Image (cartoon, rainbow, N blue to C red):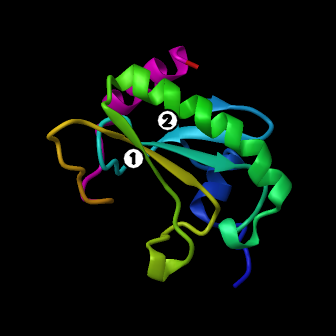
Amino acid sequence: MTYDSTNIFAKILKGELPCHKVYEDDIALVMMDIFPQSKGHTLIIPKAASRNLLDADPAALSAVMPLLQRVAGAVKSATNADGIRLAQFNEAPAGQTVFHLHFHLIPAYEDVPLGAHASGRADDAELATIAKAIAAHL
C-alpha cells in the first residue's frame, strides 16, 4: 500500500484541519486524541510522510524517539497517571485507522479501565486544558 497525502493527519500537519496542539517542532506534531481512551491520551505524529512503521525512514524513527520519551514524561506528570501505555498500529487488521505513522501515549490509572478507542469524542475545552498542562511539563 502507498502513502495517501490526503489522510486526516497529513491535513492537520498542513494546517488544513484544526487540532488541540501540545507541541510542534521540525520533527513532529504532538496533539490530543479527540477520541481518547483515557484522560490525557496524546498523539505524536512524525512529519515525515509514511503510512506506518513498516515503510518509515529509519532516520525519521530515530529522530522522533527522544521526543516520544519526553512527551511520555510530560503526559505522566501533567495527568498524575500511574503509568503510560505506548501504542502504534500497522495496517487495518492491526487496528490502524489513520494511515500516517503515529504513536499513542495513553495514561493509565490504577483501578481505572481504559476506554474503547473512538467510543466517544472528548470535550474540546477539556482537551485544550489538558494540552496546556502537558505543554507546561515539556
> Which span is picked out in magenta?
119-137
Packing grade of label 2 (10 A; few <14, some 14-19, many >=20) is: some
- Quadrant of the snapshot with the N terminus: bottom right
Disc 2 element: loop
Residue 124 colored in magenta in the image: yes
**Looking at this view, is 125 or 97 the one in front?**
97
Q: Name the residue under label 2.
A: 20
Q: Mark 1 points at which residue?
A: 34
Q: Which residue shows up at 77% across the image and 41% down it?
A: 27
Looking at this view, name the residue that lies furthest to the top: 136
Where is residue 67 shown, x and y percent of the image?
67, 35
Q: Horizontal and vertical percent for residue 37?
A: 30, 50
Mark 1 or 2 closer to N-term? 2
Three-letter code, disc 1: Ile
What residue do we see at 14% from left, 40% from top? 111
Q: Which residue type carries mark 2?
A: His
Q: Which residue lies furthest to the left in this view?
A: 111
Q: How many labels does the image show?
A: 2
Find residue 36 and report its horizontal and vertical position in percent: 34, 47
Asked if the stretch drawn in magenta spans residue 105, the answer is no
Q: Are marks 1 and 2 in contact (CB under 8 Å)?
A: yes
